[in-house]
Image (spheres, rainbow, N blue to C red):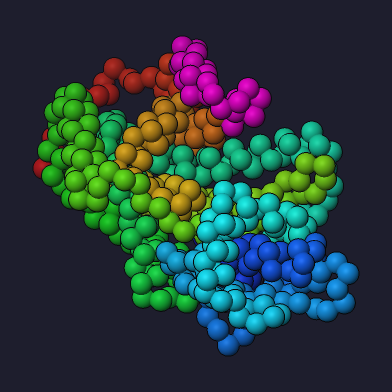
Amino acid sequence: MRRIVLAALAIVAALGLAACSDVDRQQSIVCVAIATAIGPDGRPVTIRSVEPLSGATNAVRVIFTAEGDPRTLFADCAFAGGSFSAGRTDILAVRGFSGRMPEWRLGLLKRWFLEQPGAVQAAVSEAGWAPPRYALLPIALPAWAGYAVQQVVNALNVAAFYVPLALAYALIYGLVGRLNMAFGDFAMIGGFGAVFGVVTAATAHVPSLVTVMLVSLAASVSLTALFGYLTARTVVMPLLARPPRAFIVATVGLGIVVSEGVRIAQGSREIWLQPMLGDQVLIAAGPFPVVVTVMRIVILAMSALAVVWLFAILARSAFGRAWRAVAEDALAARLFGIDVAAVTGVTFILASSLASLSGSILALGYGGTSFSAGLMLGLKALIACLIGGGTPRGALVGALLLAAIETGWAAVFGPGERDIAVLAIITLLFLLRPDGLFGRRAALEEGRPIRLS
């Protein structure tokens, strides 16, 4: 429990760090670019500060100076929406040191400057301004060491959404020896739940970013856990006493039904979110600085908390003891009074919640989801589970190994042939270790069908 509390505090600290800035990152960048455009006589400007405009909502003030001009100048930018609104970067009005900008000039500014590809970033670079970074370990590393540490950070970011889904596969496979091929689509449902949670919180004008994240995760987990329970009652339980082929075909069909149902209900276009928590944290300075966004820190903390929470449940709770007993011998567990059907149902709810977390991480981290988002994610998480031998510990190691192989190959050889190389390496691994890294061969008496009643 102490580890769980510490992990929860890490998430709260990360969210608090993210919320410590009162100025939206994207709005700050746009307003700084506008300040460079309205500077006197096109002179180079130096940004002194970027702060929220007092007495106004969704407004930013940039204080700057121009070369050869002794005055302290300013640019006030009013936007159409806040951090979670569609009009987050839409300029409504601009006021500078010479007064409010006329509508016709504001229209020209938008058309010929703000809407031109790369113009805003170029102007910000010319001003020599960068969004603030939160220094974590301000130490200087050599270029090669900084590059290596950055790749480790990137690998952990990739593993953050592989690990929960791989554990979901392992929970079911370790319990009943079957693979639920629809877990990737469960993760997709969780991603949609997270997006709907953010939209709901934004519509309700929730002021706290922490509350928005909690509403998003609650919507995702609740929706997917309910779907997982219904699936366990209607699909899983009736097929446990049947041959494995029937289970695989049924879950593959279930995944197709889910993805096509979402496509019909929500459309085939991807659903995008406004970028959140994009402020950068400087991990280590040097010729190759190691940076990560606040959102990535939150994602890593969420994934780590899920891992610690799951292993604590399996090791120390009554459900964990029942799960291990059923996984070892379901018939003996029934003879000792364990309700195998109840354990299976709770396991499916737990696994579905982990799958929803994986989908939420993908949606919040990359800013959107679609009806097909679960296909590749589910396939790779399944491979990670099988690499580890189908056990929870093995699934964790397999997900970390898969993320390390993907990131390492992309860093050394580029992302072009990454998936081909990763699958080739995994094929070689299975040739050397057919049962996975931590798998064990089934005993002669194992695998007999057990009817649950």
User: Where is residue 306 shown, x and y percent of the image?
Assistant: 47, 52
Determine whether, in the image, residue 370 is placed left or right of residue 16. left
Predominant secondary structure, magenta span: helix
| Residue 445 in view (yes/no) | yes
Residue 134 visible in the picture: no
* On screen, residue 39 above or below 367: below
| Along the line of sight, the residue nearer the viewer: 372 or 146 | 372
Q: Could you tell whether 388 is left or right of 289 in the image?
A: left
Quarter assignment of residue 138: bottom right
Magenta residues, start to end? 407-432
With 263 as the anchor, is 410 left or right in this view? right
Q: Nearer the viewer, residue 141 or 123?
A: 123
**Whole-percent x, y for residue 159 in the image:** 52, 40
Q: Residue at x 66, y 62 (%)?
A: 33
**Viewer-proximal residue among 109 and 47:** 109
Residue 137 percent across, percent down from the top left: 77, 54
Q: Compared with residue 448, is residue 150 higher up or lower down, i.e. above or below?
A: below
- Residue farthest bottom in this picture: 55
Q: Quadrant of residue 269?
A: top left
In the depicted structure, whether residue 252 falls above or below residue 347: above
Q: Residue at x 76, y 59 (%)?
A: 127
The C terminus, quarter of image:
top left
Residue drawn at the location 59% of the way across and 32% of the way down: 407
Residue 168 in which image quadrant: top left
Number of disc labels: 0
Magenta stretch holds residue 81: no
